[in-house]
Amino acid sequence: MTLSQQMYSAVNNSPKTALTVAITATSTLIAVDDASKLPDGPNLAVIGYEADAEIIRYATKDGDNLGGVTRGVNGTTAKAWPVGTVIARNFTAYDHEAFRRNIEELDEQKVDKDYLAENYYTKETIDETIDEIKTDTEDLAHRMNKTENDLEALAAQSSWKRYGISGYGSESAAALTRLYDAVGMVAEVGTDGDNSEVRNDFDTAAPFMTKKCVGTWTLVDGKPKFNITAYEGQPGYAEDGSAGDYVAVEYPLSYWSESNGVRAIASHQYDGMQPFDIFRENHDPKKLLAKVYGRRHSTESRSRCQDWNRKTDHTTPCAISPASTAMAAWRTSPSSSRRPSTSTKSS
């Protein structure tokens, strides 16, 4: 039985890839960094995010190239997209409408069995046709259930961001190009003696979104535990020692990867990513810490942490954070070789 609306296969969790070559609004060949994350053609893909996203239909997949591309599918607008723009096989309005229309067609094709027997078909043929309809309906019901599960996973994924740069290792910072969710983000830097306000979009993006807090360290079962008295901005926060003798920065669990000159960092573990070692309890990859704390005042930080390490032989929570150093590097602009020595914003 042939249905009028073509349906396309999906991929679990809608993994993302990215454009490796900028495209115009009329490009029909699209190059991506990992086409294995997209289904074989013909199929659909979504470029970009939310209201500005564009749905495309590609006919073939050859290596990391999508060919025979139809732009602006299902009423979306074809437009130019830069290198690093995210592309994925997301669930679209077209998929939902195709399911709905095909189910309605199957329902309309259910006919009176006795009428068909008297006028057109034998009983055996009718039984076969009804069995086909049941099978098609069950298959559509299964797909709808899977789609609902995919939508739940997609909703969860909407909060997972991945930030990347290509050209890592180049002698010039101008050679760096932002990738994935870092595309279009602004990262201004301050310099000594300049108190003007600066804008850094990474200040509010996980995993760069660190929190300043104050508290005290204690030993629990032979391991150091940081007890937070208050976060900066909350009642009770003070740096004069009355709220605790340790002013710290809280770093959330984050992951990183590096391959072929491309570095990426995220608060969710994408394929090929590993946690920063600072988050591994006793360097055990199976025991990850959700948060770690680094000394806010670097002058006292190293001696205090070394003291804790000598006492506990447990370097993870109190070590001078390599993750914090890496995050600081990511917050600088790829288009500028300047590094911030001071800034009017605190981490």
Image (cartoon, rainbow, N blue to C red):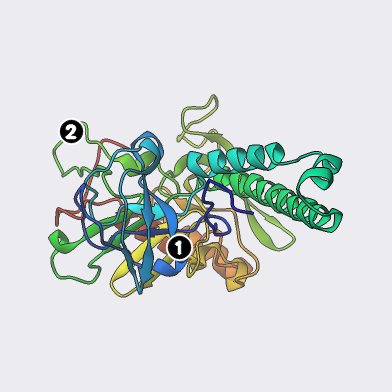
Q: Is residue 215 visible?
A: no
- Looking at the image, residue 64 lies above or below residue 154: below
Asked which secondary structure carries label 1, the reply is loop
Asked which secondary structure carries label 2, the reply is loop
Crowd band around label 2 with a 10 angstrom C-alpha radius: few (<14), some (14–19), many (20+):
few
Closer to the eye: label 1 or 2: 1
Looking at the picture, how far across and down is residue 164, in whole percent?
Answer: 33, 58
Residue 38 is tagged as 1
**Which one is nearer the viewer's eye here, 57 or 206?**
57
> Which residue does the image show at 41% across and 37% down from the upper left?
50
- Indicate the amino acid at tag 1: Leu
> Which residue does the image show at 36% across and 41% down from the upper left?
53
Q: Real-space Cα distance between discs 1 and 2?
A: 47 Å
- Give the position of the N terminus as an image quadrant: bottom right
Residue positioned most to the top: 235
Please indicate whether residue 313 sits to the left or right of residue 340 in the image: right
Looking at the picture, how far across and down is residue 247, in whole percent?
Answer: 47, 43
- Give the position of the C terminus as an image quadrant: top left
**Which one is nearer the viewer's eye here, 89 or 216?**
89
**Which one is nearer the viewer's eye here, 313 or 343?**
343
Please indicate whether residue 138 sits to the left or right of residue 311 in the image: right
Crowd band around label 1 with a 10 angstrom C-alpha radius: few (<14), some (14–19), many (20+):
many
**Which one is nearer the viewer's eye here, 118 or 213?**
118
Q: Say whether disc 1 or disc 2 marks the residue closer to the N-terminus.
A: 1
- Indicate the amino acid at tag 2: Asn
Looking at the picture, how far across and down is residue 251, in whole percent?
Answer: 48, 50
Q: Which residue is mark 2?
A: 195
Looking at the picture, how far across and down is residue 9, in whole percent?
Answer: 54, 58
